[in-house]
Each structure stands twice: as structure tokens, then as C-alpha cells.
Image (cartoon, grey):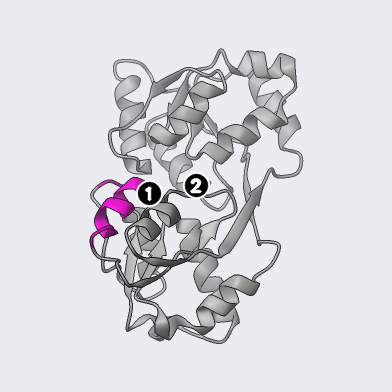
Amino acid sequence: MLVTRASEQAPALIDALSKLGAKAIVVPTITIIPPPSFAELDQAISELEQIDYLLLTSVNAVTAFFDRLESLGHNSRVLNDLQTVVVGPKSAEALVAHGVRADLMPDNYRAEGVVELLKDRVSGKKLLYPKAALARDLITAELTAAGGMIIDPVAYASAPPDAAAGKLQQALANGLDLLTFTASSTVQNFVDLLDADHLAQAKEVPVASIGPLTSETVRKLGFNVVIEPVDSTLDDMIIAIEKYFSGTRLNL
């Protein structure tokens, strides 16, 4: 099974697949990099006393925000007077690692869930939403329409890792039973890293996708999604993989 997550996030999936008896082939198609400028994020951090809600919609967002907070000489106590909102359990866990417990988390672990959770709370409120460079505009657009004042600086970006293309070609040559994708960016980078022949070969391999947004990208790019959990979490994706291969030796 091919694991395409960023190297710092891959171990959880690798360990879980190994416990199921599967062989994880790790070729990250994404690496997290700093944004071109921290100016907007730094300005927002300097004005945290004016913020009502801090929105953290991924583990990467949590890491990027706190890395910058600490680099500017602050600690988590500056968040005491605002409400922290996370997208799901993994983001909440990442937040706890920095000594902060999330105040709010939606039932639907997606941007749509964050909008549904906050849309009736944000009129006249100021929200800080540190985001990825390629983040959808959904949260900003919908919560602005609901009367919120959104500050949405880019906190991190992503890029394909060096040498990933050759590693993907070798993995395909050795044979794969499943491709796993946990974000649309990992899918797009996967496609961009392969030439036409290797891409055609890859499209013959079934795909496990973490959720509907990733699945939409996978299908649009011509792949076959055979596994998608009801809830868009890594734990549920692993359970769905186990169910899919139930009755077979997961010694892949």
C-alpha cells in the first residue's frame, strides 16, 4: 500500500497498516514549507487581544501557528481570552500538545462543519483563520457572509518533495495493491510527479481516500476510489481499509 502523506505525518498510517499485516510503501508526495511571507500572520498575532475566535483546521495549521507564535516570543497564555475552534480530533490532539484545549469542534470534521458550527455565532465577531496557501475559500466566504470579520493569513504552503518522482516509479514497478490519499494536494502532486506511462499504470491501482473532498479530486483525475470512510478521519480510513480487505490476508 502506498502512503503519500507528508513524512512528519506518515508514521501513524504506517504503524496502523503494519498492525493490519499490510506492507506500507512510503513515498510522500507533499512536504510542508513556510509561506512566501509571514507578515500577515505576524500582524494578526500582534493583535490577538482583538480576536474572538481562532480557527485551526488541520494539524499543519496548529503546528504552523504555534511555531510562529513561539518564534515571536509568545506562549499559549495569549490565547486565554479567545475561543479556539478545531476541525476534528487530530487537530484537537495537536492543540493539547501546546497546552491548549479546544473550545469548539464540529460533528462534521470538514470546513463545512466549521461553517455550520459558527455561522450563528460570528456576527460582529473577529476571527483569525491561519490557513494553507491552497485552502478553499469556503470558511472565509461563508463566515464573512454570516457577519464575521475574518483575518485569514497564509500560515504554511506545500510542495512536492525532491526525488519523489523516481521513488513513485519504483513503487509502481514493484507492484501496489492500494494508493492512499489524505488530502487533495497529495493527489494532485502524485499526478504531477508522474509521466504519462506511469500515470496510466497508477490509475489501475484502487484508491483509499480519507473523505469526499479528496475523493472528488481523485475521481476528477481519473482514479478509482474503492475506500472512503463515513467520517473524514485517519482512524476511520484505517478501519475502512481493514473492512475492504476483510477475509483476505492483509500481507500486501
The vertical placement of 199 against 62, above or below, is above
Q: Which residue is mark 2?
A: 136
Residue 36 lies, in percent from the top left, at 71, 62
Q: Is residue 7 magenta?
A: no
Dots 1 and 2: beta carbons under 8 Å?
yes
Secondary structure mainly formed by the magenta segment = helix
Residue 27 lies, in percent from the top left, at 62, 37
Picture quadrant where residue 52 is located = bottom left
Q: Which residue is mark 1?
A: 111
Q: Is residue 110 magenta?
A: yes
Q: Earlier in the sequence, mark 1 or mark 2?
A: 1
Which is more toward the observer, 89 or 176?
89
Element at label 1: helix
Q: Residues within 10 Å of mark 2 (few under 14, many from 20)?
A: few
Give the amino acid type for the residue marked by disc 2 in the picture: Arg
Q: Identify which residue is drawn at 26% across, 69% down.
A: 103
Question: Is 102 displayed left or right of 46 in the figure?
Answer: left
Which is more toward the observer, 43 or 252?
43
Q: Identify which residue is drawn at 65% across, 25% down.
A: 171
Question: Is 140 displayed left or right of 188 in the figure?
Answer: left
Gap between marks 1 and 2, in whole Å? Answer: 9 Å
Element at label 2: loop
Residue 110 appearing in the image: no
The vertical placement of 75 against 131, above or below, is below
Question: Is 219 displayed left or right of 30 in the figure?
Answer: left
Q: Which mark is residue 208?
A: none
Q: Residues within 10 Å of mark 1 (few under 14, many from 20)?
A: many
Give the amino acid type for the residue marked by disc 1 in the picture: Ala
Q: Identify which residue is drawn at 46% across, 34% down.
A: 214
Segment tinted magenta in the rendering: 108-120
